[in-house]
Image (tube, rainbow, N blue to C red):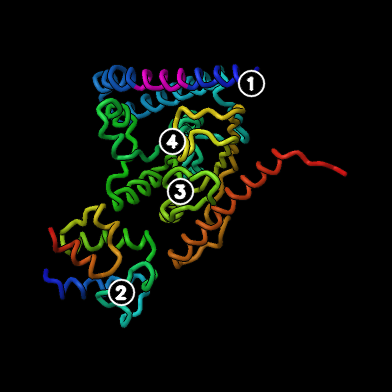
């Protein structure tokens, strides 16, 4: 899965399940501050990304994640 | 001068308690629990026996703590103790031995153990025999806690996630409230105070305060999440509100304990 389609996947999850406005989902949007995702949403997002991509984000690197770009980087690094 | 000798005695007592705890942990981890694995093959049966061993061990340790006056431990609300009930036990976390106190009161409750402890060769067999939950992966942790409660058993969580920093306000992470909401389990709140501060996050284990530290452990009646905040479909709001309500309960009990500790002067 490339970065563009991953981005769209993440955007869809955020919009459909976490009531985030589609327009506010950008690469540099801060999950916690701008998109008002809480720590539990973040874990739920992690679970779903694991199902979609088959890739796991290491718990340590997920703690560092702030923006959507960070999520993509953490997913594609491996 | 007299307080100095009392202090020295308690310092000795504290060191003794920790030595006994360490040796007890070794005996359990290297002898008793490996034997449990040999003699009890059934995981469920082994878990029950292992947890009752741990509960008794912790109970004996706390007896020693009180006997040498390293600390005094007062438990209120014992009538609410029931470790067979399907419930989420939540408590604030002022000291290193909160879990020891709570497990001695609720021996069959499950709890979450740091991954480092699960890997520790001396503790591994104990943790595995008791079948405690590891905190290794956040997504598994949440799911493991929920499914354990759904099975009809009790689980102990410290919603702060780590010990409180002394003199700082208590904050709860959302995990415990989320587990309660998703597992639809009753919540049994426990407020723990230790005064003066002892075994806190800022103090080393051998720090002994001038006065005997007194633990007050107040067990409150179990309540359904829907009793504390109106049940609602928006899970995110539900967990935030429930978390706030649980925090309020613990904070107000702690404020009450502090108030009753201070003498009241009448004019």
Q: CA distance from mark 3 to mark 2?
A: 28 Å
Q: Marks 1 and 4: same chain?
A: yes
The chain that hosts pointer 1 is B
Residue ID at (23%, 66%): A70
**CB atoms at circles 4 and 3 under 8 Å apart?**
no
Q: Main secondary structure of the magenta part?
A: helix
Of discs 3 and 1, which sits in the foreground?
1
**CB atoms at circles 1 and 4 under 8 Å apart?**
no
Q: Which residue is mark 1?
A: B3
Residue ID at (49%, 22%): B14
Q: Give neighbour class at mark 1: few <14, some 14-19, many 20+ (Cα, 10 Å).
A: few
Query: Is residue B67 depicted above or below B165 in this figure?
Result: above
Q: Which residue is mark 4?
A: B109
The chain that hosts pointer 3 is B
Quadrant housing the N terminus of chain B? top right
Q: Which residue is mark 2?
A: A29
Residue ID at (57%, 42%): B191
Q: Which residue is mark 3?
A: B159
């Amino acid at each position: 899965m490339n970065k563009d389609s991953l981005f769209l996947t993440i955007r869809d999850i955020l919009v459909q399940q976490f009531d985030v406005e589609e327009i506010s989902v950008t690469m540099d949007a801060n999950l916690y501050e701008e998109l008002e995702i809480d720590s539990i949403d973040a874990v739920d997002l992690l679970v779903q990304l694991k199902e979609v991509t088959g890739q796991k984000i290491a718990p340590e690197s997920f703690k560092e994640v702030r923006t959507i770009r960070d999520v993509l980087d953490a997913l594609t690094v491996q | 001068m007299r307080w100095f000798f009392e202090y020295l005695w308690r310092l000795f007592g504290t060191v003794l308690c920790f030595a006994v705890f360490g040796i007890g942990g070794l005996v359990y981890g290297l002898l008793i629990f490996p034997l449990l694995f040999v003699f009890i093959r059934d995981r469920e049966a082994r878990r029950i026996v292992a947890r009752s061993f741990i509960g008794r061990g912790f109970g004996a340790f706390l007896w020693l703590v009180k006997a040498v006056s390293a600390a005094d431990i007062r438990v209120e609300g014992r009538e609410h103790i029931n470790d067979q009930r399907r419930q989420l036990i939540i408590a604030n976390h002022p000291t290193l031995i909160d879990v020891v106190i709570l497990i001695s009161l609720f021996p069959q409750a499950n709890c979450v153990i740091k991954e480092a402890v699960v890997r520790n060769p001396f503790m591994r067999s104990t943790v595995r025999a008791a079948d405690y939950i590891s905190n290794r992966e956040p997504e598994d942790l949440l799911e493991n806690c929920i499914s354990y409660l759904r099975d009809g058993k009790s689980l102990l969580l410290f919603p702060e996630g780590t010990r409180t920093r002394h003199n700082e306000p208590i904050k709860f992470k959302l995990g415990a409230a989320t587990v309660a909401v998703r597992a639809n389990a009753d919540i049994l709140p426990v407020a723990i105070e230790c005064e003066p501060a002892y075994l806190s996050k800022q103090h080393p284990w051998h720090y002994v305060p001038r006065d005997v530290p007194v633990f007050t452990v107040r067990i409150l009646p179990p309540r359904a999440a829907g009793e504390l905040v109106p049940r609602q479909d928006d899970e995110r709001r539900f967990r935030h509100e429930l978390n706030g309500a649980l925090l309020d309960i613990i904070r107000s009990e702690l404020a009450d304990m502090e108030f009753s500790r201070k003498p009241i002067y009448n004019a």
